[in-house]
Amino acid sequence: MENITEKNLEIDGIEQVINVFGSFDENVKIIEDTFNVKIINRGTELKIIGEDQNTVNAEKVLKNLLERSAQGDSINEQAVRYIISLVNEGQEDKIKTLGEDCICITAQGKPIKAKTLGQKQYIEAIKNNVVIFGVGPAGTGKTYLAVSMAVTAFRNKEVNRIILTRPAVEAGEKLGFLPGDLQNKVDPYLRPLYDALYDMIGAETYLKYLEKGMIEVAPLAYMRGRTLDNSFIILDEAQNTTPEQMKMFLTRIGFGSKAIITGDITQIDLPRGTHSGLKEAIKVLKNIEGIEFCYLTDRDVVRHPLVQKIIKAYEKFDEERETRKK
């Protein structure tokens, strides 16, 4: 049996303790349960008591959480569990890189940073390539980070306009049954893009840029026949494009432009028998220079931890179903 040891950590102030401990100490309870240790707060000091290696690992997790808190990051359950997983894999040295770069400042003054190594890789891919495919499950920040990078490029005058588009594919309801004219009918499909833009630049600024043609949010069908120069273009929900639509979109890219294509190949809403343009593009374009594919996984989910569990459960179910078919 290992020896029981004690580690002490100095903390800067009560604000850090509140942020790291979480509501009702929920963050610390996760660390205690994972490593079978006891964590005690004594004013400006944290005391960790447990078996040797468990105490060392718990200390590593707490040190990283305290550093992220000092950088102004909000600590939640997702962040705690992600750092625990990296410490268990011996990759805690990589955690510090997550807080290094601020991608964008929102309209409320909140800094946007990568929260996982997968997200950091995705951001680097966007910086260094003309066409980037961000493929992964819901909640991994594919669209939000892409919009953040678009706003940053626009603010830095690297591009003249931002174009956001999605295929208006019906998922359970018919367009014709929705009220209003065509724009009213397609607006619900574009809502996630509006929300991300409002968060980044505010509703008033968005409307101002929209009137001037500097920002455009439109269904994919509106892209046909155009050449998009000096633009930051985002195609969201790309799994719901047909191969023809994907080819049409990719051939719109003009000089000085950057295109990000995001999608989740496990959530295809196309009619049965219709091939996904995203799936085909992954096969056709995988070896072309200037195009990079970035694959995010359930580990990069930054929504509620239940989302991660739901994704894993569906993946397991799909694997078992495919096995039964064979």
Image (cartoon, rainbow, N blue to C red):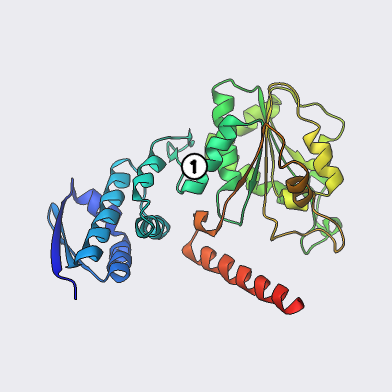
Question: Badge 1 local density, few (<14 within 10 Å), some, or many (20+)?
Answer: some
Q: Nearer the viewer, residue 226 or 319?
A: 319
Q: Quadrant of residue 100?
A: top left
Q: How far from the left and from the top, in percent, is residue 128? A: 58, 30
Q: Secondary structure at mark 1?
A: helix
Residue at left offset 51%, top offset 45%: 119
The location of residue 44, given as percent across then percent down, is 13, 51
Q: Quadrant of residue 17?
A: bottom left
Query: How many numbered discs sit on the rendered protein?
Result: 1
> Is residue 202 shown to the viewer in this render?
no
Q: Percent from the top left, x then y, of residue 297?
A: 56, 56
Q: Amino acid at mark 1?
A: Lys
Question: Considering the image in quadrants, where does the C terminus appear?
Answer: bottom right
Q: Quadrant of the N terminus?
A: bottom left
Q: Residue furthest bottom?
A: 324
Q: Quadrant of residue 315?
A: bottom right
Confirm whether residue 124 shows in the render.
yes
Q: Residue at x 67, y 48 (%)?
A: 191
Residue 214: x and y, percent?
Answer: 67, 26
| Horizontal side of residue 269 vs 56, given as left or right | right
Q: Which residue is mark 1?
A: 120
Residue at 54 percent of width and 29 percent of height: 152
Say if 87 sits above or below 30 in the image: above
**Residue 237 placement, left or right of 49:** right
Residue at 14% from the left image edge and 70% from the top image edge: 3
Task: Please indicate whether residue 167 sits to the left or right of residue 40 in the image.
Answer: right
Closest to the observer, 171 or 271 = 271
